[in-house]
Amino acid sequence: MLIRMKCSRCGKTFTDYPPFALPYKRFVSDEIMERSLRYLQQDTMTYERAACKLDTSQINGRSPPPSLPIYHPDLDKPRRLRPSTIHRWITTLGGLDKTLHTAMSLLLEKGDDIHRQVIDVAARKYRSQQRKMRLQDCLRLLHTNARYRIMFERSIFPHLAIGCCWQ
């Protein structure tokens, strides 16, 4: 359940999201970030393979299972996570420029050198310069979130991102 509050002055409604939830997303933030990071860090990873759930038997160099079953109470058979879902997650996370810059500024104030980290994505993962920048921004946000958790003992999501209006 989400807590919603309405301002008596301006009439706006505010939602208090738990630490594991992202607005308008059906999956928890840790799952979104883990799969996005796996796609971006591994040069040979595809969206289809990133959509598959890895178990411990798949770590020794074997390929991941063909699909991640997601059980829906209204359906008898399992549904699969689509590869385009990973693409949309990465696009969304890579577009949070204001959130990224705010988090990096806070880390810089604490003496962290996250801004010096070189972020590179395999050339086979993009066709345009715009997509390359989006992938790099997403990877930078994921690395920044990891450092932010260490420094501040909390994630960027959802509160800092909400404060930055999800931009």
Image (cartoon, rainbow, N blue to C red):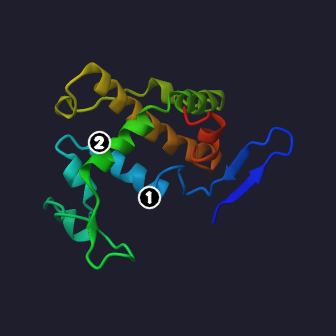
Residue drawn 47% across and 52% down?
Answer: 25
Element under disc 1: loop
Q: Is residue 135 visible?
A: yes
Residue drawn 57% across and 48% down?
Answer: 155
Between 88 and 100, the one lying in front of the other is 88
Q: Where is residue 114 in the image (x, y as percent from the top left)?
A: 50, 30
Q: Quadrant where the N terminus lies?
A: bottom right
Q: Position of residue 148 (x, y in %)?
A: 57, 42
Residue designated by label 1: 27
**Whole-number angstrom distance, CA of label 2 to CA of label 1:** 21 Å
Q: Is residue 55 visible?
A: no
Q: Position of residue 107 (x, y in %)?
A: 60, 32
**On the rendered structure, is 17 left or right of 52?**
right
Q: Quadrant where the C terminus lies?
A: top right
Q: Check the image and name the residue furthest to the right.
A: 9
- The amino acid type found where label 1 is placed reads Phe
Residue designated by label 2: 41
Q: Quadrant of residue 104?
A: top right
